[in-house]
Amino acid sequence: KTKEMIAIAEALHERKYAEIADEVYKRRDSVKLVLIAGPSSSGKTTTSKRIALQCKVLGLNPKVIAMDDYFVNREFTPKDENGEYDFESIYAMDLDFLSTQLNALFQGEEVELPKFDFIQGKRVPSGHFMTLKEGDVLIMEGIHALNPELTKHIGSEKVFRVYASALTTLSVDENNSISTADTRMLRRMVRDNRTRGIVPEETILRWMRVRRGEERNIFPFQENADIMFNSSILFELPLLKYYAEPLLKRI
């Protein structure tokens, strides 16, 4: 019954994406920006793409903006208690510039979207211009999407907020469990190794810093969401095992 179980799990997810798109559609006269937040490897990027697809089904025209392109230039990045650049701070984002561009778009103006050059550590012109027309809706995903500081200069009626997280705990026995955070770390380990060339031990060593950033920048604001999405999948851990076990065994 494996194929049927997988099909049902995927169909359940698709229904949830459709429900979120339905909520956006109901508020289409006022909502111009859909923000998607969640901790590391919670499925933010996949969720944003699938919601965008469901919005198209309803006749809306979703346009995606990358929040990462609104970083301040490297020399203006705040530093943490150890004197290192704190890229996970909301003030690593150019909030004023982001608000200015979003409000200009909401007023029907044309803007040139920025492009952040991570090698040079600065924002450069992208040559990509955008305007919003009737039926257009912006979609942005990022760890700060639910922080009120991000949208304090934007009317709340224009914003719809989604919180995505993999809310699954598997009990191995009465003393051992695989927590939600463990599942996300396995997701990140597999993704980093397959798409970014990062060895699993490096993912593990970074994980405590990632978790610290989540406690500061994401979890305190999750209740600001208009809707929550559980991105966990019933067959996920057996599937992750296929990719993650050889990586873990080589450490």
Image (tube, helix red, strand yellow):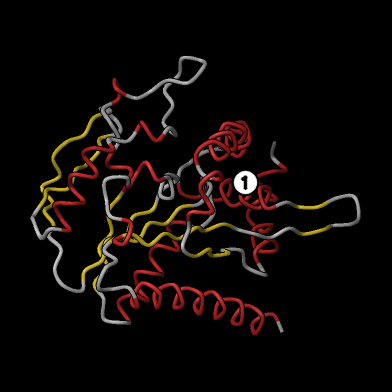
User: Left or right: 176 with respect to 247?
Assistant: right
**Residue in front for this viewpoint, 36 or 181:** 36
Q: Is residue 189 above or below residue 90?
A: below
Which residue is labeled 1 in the image?
185
User: Left or right: 208 with respect to 55?
Assistant: right
Q: Name which quarter of the figure residue 77 lies in.
A: top left
Q: Is residue 62 above or below residue 186?
A: below
Q: Secondary structure at mark 1?
A: helix
Give me the residue at 28% from left, 38% from top.
Answer: 95
Q: Residues within 10 Å of mark 1 (few under 14, many from 20)?
A: many
Q: Position of residue 104 (x, y in %)?
A: 14, 52
Q: Is residue 166 above or below residue 101?
A: below
Residue type, numbered disc 1: Met
Give me the residue at 57% from left, 78% from top.
Answer: 12
Give me the residue at 70% from left, 63% from top.
Answer: 238
Q: Position of residue 186 (x, y in %)?
A: 63, 49
Q: Position of residue 172 (x, y in %)?
A: 84, 57
Quadrant containing the N terminus is bottom right
Q: Name which quarter of the figure residue 169 lies in.
A: bottom right
Give me the residue at 27% from left, 35% from top.
Answer: 94
